[in-house]
Image (spheres, rainbow, N blue to C red):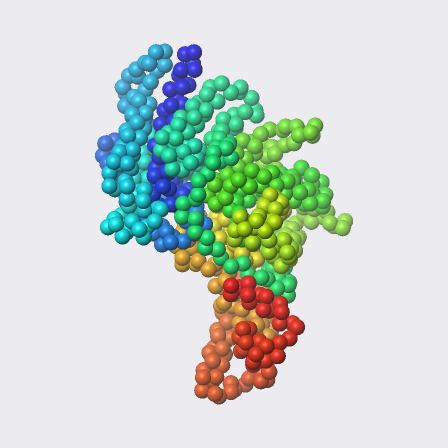
């Protein structure tokens, strides 16, 4: 009984911290309509700042608390409010992307400022004071202060929200900002107060809990998973139920730590318990209407088969160039462009077509890597198929409970699944499934070898790079065919309105299971190729935080675009890696870029997607046959010079960039001259285009059949125009 009471005190102390953090999360959501994925990261930054002031710089505790809670936390809350103000008028997805981007950026920023390899700890409050006893249980002053703070927060928030005009304004703002403004209230001020208070509560929780755990950016940021579970108990709107949920989560963690048998399989269960509880809460508790659930859906372009085939040829050509101009060591690094592109491509059918936000796609890639290593230990080619199938089955299993979830709740559920895999499943030793012994990341890593295909063994980085590019081209073509198929149109219809889709006879369960399985299968293929490229991978390479940049860059590219996959893989394994190779001290800065870019995207700077913007800039060059032929000749010429070692790799890639810029400039110049000549009725000198060719290219598609005869081959072009122009 004494032990039970002791664990109960520890659990209530932890619960008090979760209650403080969770109440800040609920306060922000109920007032602003924004679910803040970066809430835990704000507490993490406060804890690191407190350590910097007290331990490293030696300031008194009271002064450090005044600076952190009185200056830094409110200032950060104001900055977040300013950053999120533009997305208040946007849909739920944009708000979600913004906070996920903040989470990724803050973790990277903390690792940049505070070396993650250094050990840090924060002393508890009043460590020199003698503990007191409640019955047979010992209570430290730090524990007593923590519980007193939680009680004070509960009382203070109750008074603020229901007994003051400011609280009433805060609750009313999210329901109808325009109506609140007509009453003389200021919605912007209400949001500002909510963000400041929410950040303050996150900072208080971060400082209180940092003395009991190691100061690690990722660990502290993901402690929010426990607060998420508590907030879901309160259905993101009830502060009392949030406190009840915090007590459940805190005591569950404490009693599991005390009574769970100590063997190789169960310690991870204790660490993953909050994420498991979050999934259970998501499935069991009814969810009200999501705040601010505006349907502002982006258009999904209709790809042409010819354009997709050309894009696939470009991908394979790029891989051949890399394989012939880079040495083995560089290819192992830059060859990851293609496996990472395949993983990122999995977001296109899942999030781009079906509107299902999944934050566990890198986890699915890890499952694919493990499956390929298990089935393909001797290079069996069918191990790649097995990796796709195993990952697809895992995706289908997730899809069944996901039928109850959407938007924020689905993102939370998939994030919880990723954390469970990181903290528990991927750490398990050998276990048995249907009588078969399975080992995941044995001794922390798994070994993969290249496949035997048609009797040929792919065991070099160059061969696997080209092989990965061919599979990426085929996967891209498959997704294009999906978009053009009847099932693809059904997925888009389901994204537009699940209720309407079901009313018209669509099977939501079948559609979600199929698209989750497809997305997971594509990610599993990418994970298997990723492991083959590196030959050995660890569980850390597939964790939840590592997957956030993939998601953010894919969103920036435009989730509905087929090129989002290659764009993401190219950016993360291409320029970002090259910058770090040239300037090693920039590694931390480069790690922050995806998060900052995600903030810029959600704020509207890149709201149409980078692929869409790039197509507007570069499509004229590809449509100009003379310009395209000139660039191909330029490219082949310098490639031959590189293969014969006349020039080095840097000169080769520099020449390609110069050639692209020059051709693009010439095409733009010719287009401007053509436009100016049309304005004054003068033909363009040197132009050999006939009147029919000019009319075909200049007459808008809306006038086909009126200003010129309609032709059978126009149907596909019109279909594409309708899809892209809405």
The image shows residue 601, relative to residue 706, as above or below, that is above
Q: Position of residue 316 (x, y in %)?
A: 63, 59
The image shows residue 297, relative to residue 115, as above or below, that is below
- Determine if residue 388 is in view: yes
Q: Nearer the viewer, residue 11 or 488?
A: 488
| Image quadrant occupied by the N terminus | top left
Q: Position of residue 198 (x, y in %)?
A: 32, 39
Judged from this view, the residue extending furthest toward the front is: 503
Query: Which residue does the image show at 40% across and 58% down from the upper left?
Result: 605
Looking at the rendered structure, the number of numbered marks drawn on it comes to 0
Query: Which residue does the image show at 55% across and 73% down from the upper left?
Result: 701
Q: Nearer the viewer, residue 206 or 707?
A: 707
Instruction: Tell me if 321 is positioned left or right of 268 in this view.
Output: right
Q: Position of residue 21 (x, y in %)?
A: 36, 34
Q: Quadrant of residue 296?
A: bottom left
Judged from this view, the residue extending furthest toward the right is: 455
Query: Which residue does the image show at 25% across and 31% down from the upper left?
Result: 61
Judged from this view, the residue extending furthest toward the bottom is: 682
- Determine if residue 331 is in view: no
Query: Which residue does the image show at 38% across and 54% down from the upper left?
Result: 89
Q: Nearer the viewer, residue 598 or 380?
A: 598
Instruction: Tell me if 51 is positioned left or right of 709 in this view.
Output: left
The image shows residue 1, relative to residue 342, as above or below, that is above
Q: Position of residue 518 (x, y in %)?
A: 62, 47
Instruction: Tell me if 499 is positioned left or right of 459 in this view.
Output: left
């Amino acid at each position: 009984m004494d032990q039970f009471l002791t664990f109960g005190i520890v659990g209530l102390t932890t619960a008090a911290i979760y209650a403080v953090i969770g109440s800040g999360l609920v306060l922000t959501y109920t007032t602003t309509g924004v679910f803040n994925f970066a809430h835990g990261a704000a507490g993490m930054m406060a804890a690191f700042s407190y350590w910097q002031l007290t331990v490293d710089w030696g300031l008194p505790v009271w002064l450090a608390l005044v600076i952190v809670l009185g200056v830094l936390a409110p200032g950060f809350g104001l900055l977040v409010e300013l950053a999120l103000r533009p997305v208040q008028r946007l849909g739920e997805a944009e708000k979600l992307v913004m906070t996920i981007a903040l989470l990724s950026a803050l973790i990277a920023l903390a690792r940049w400022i505070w070396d993650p390899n250094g050990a840090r700890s924060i002393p508890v409050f009043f460590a020199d004071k003698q503990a007191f006893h409640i019955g047979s249980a010992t209570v430290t002053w730090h524990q007593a202060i923590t519980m007193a703070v939680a009680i004070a927060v509960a009382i203070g928030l109750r008074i603020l929200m229901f007994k003051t005009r400011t609280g009433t304004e805060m609750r009313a703002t999210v329901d109808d900002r325009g109506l609140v403004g007509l009453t003389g209230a200021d919605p912007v001020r209400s949001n500002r107060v909510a963000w400041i208070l929410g950040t303050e509560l996150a900072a208080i929780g971060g400082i209180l809990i940092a003395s009991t755990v190691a100061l690690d950016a990722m660990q502290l940021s993901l402690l929010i998973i426990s607060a998420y579970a508590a907030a879901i108990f309160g259905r993101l709107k009830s502060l009392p139920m949030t406190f009840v949920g915090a007590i459940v989560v805190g005591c569950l963690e404490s009693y599991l730590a005390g009574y769970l048998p100590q063997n190789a399989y169960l310690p991870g269960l204790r660490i993953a318990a909050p994420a498991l509880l979050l999934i259970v809460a998501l499935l069991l508790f009814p969810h009200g209407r999501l705040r601010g659930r505006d349907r502002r859906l982006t258009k999904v372009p209709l790809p042409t088969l010819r354009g997709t085939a050309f894009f696939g040829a470009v991908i394979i050509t790029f891989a051949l160039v890399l394989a012939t101009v880079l040495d083995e060591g560089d290819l192992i690094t830059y060859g990851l462009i293609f496996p990472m592109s395949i993983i990122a491509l999995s977001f296109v059918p899942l999030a781009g077509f079906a509107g299902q936000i999944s934050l566990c796609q890198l986890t699915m890639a890890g499952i694919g890597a493990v499956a390929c290593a298990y089935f393909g230990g001797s290079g069996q080619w069918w191990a790649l198929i097995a990796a796709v199938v195993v990952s697809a089955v895992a995706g289908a299993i997730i899809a069944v409970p996901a039928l109850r979830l959407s938007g924020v709740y689905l993102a939370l559920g998939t994030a919880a699944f990723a954390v469970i895999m990181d903290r528990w499943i991927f750490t398990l030793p050998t276990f048995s499934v249907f009588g078969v012994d399975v080992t995941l990341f044995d001794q922390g890593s798994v070994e993969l070898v290249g496949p035997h295909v048609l009797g040929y063994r792919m065991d070099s980085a160059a061969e696997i790079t080209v092989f990965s590019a061919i599979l990426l081209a085929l996967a891209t073509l498959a997704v294009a065919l999906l978009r053009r198929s009847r099932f693809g149109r059904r997925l888009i219809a389901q994204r537009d309105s699940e209720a309407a889709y079901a009313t018209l006879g669509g099977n939501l369960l079948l559609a979600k299971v199929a698209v989750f399985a497809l997305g997971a299968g594509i990610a599993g293929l990418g994970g298997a190729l990723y492991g083959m490229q590196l030959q050995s991978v660890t569980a850390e390479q597939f964790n939840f935080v590592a997957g956030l940049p993939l998601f953010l860059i894919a969103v920036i590219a435009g989730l509905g675009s087929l090129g989002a996959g290659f764009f993401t893989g190219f950016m993360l394994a291409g320029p970002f890696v090259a910058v770090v190779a040239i300037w090693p001290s920039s590694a931390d800065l480069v790690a922050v870029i995806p998060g900052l870019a995600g903030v810029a995207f959600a704020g509207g700077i890149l709201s149409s997607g980078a692929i869409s913007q790039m197509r507007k800039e570069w499509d004229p060059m590809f449509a100009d046959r003379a310009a395209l032929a000139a660039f191909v000749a330029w490219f082949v010429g310098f490639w031959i010079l590189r293969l014969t070692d006349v020039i080095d790799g840097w000169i080769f890639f520099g020449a390609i960039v110069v050639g692209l810029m020059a051709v693009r400039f010439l095409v733009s110049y010719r287009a401007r001259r053509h436009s100016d000549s049309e304005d004054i009725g003068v033909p363009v000198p040197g132009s050999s285009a006939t009147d029919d060719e000019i009319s075909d290219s200049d007459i808008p598609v809306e006038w086909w059949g009126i200003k010129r005869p309609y032709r059978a081959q126009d149907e596909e072009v019109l279909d594409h125009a309708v899809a892209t122009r809405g």
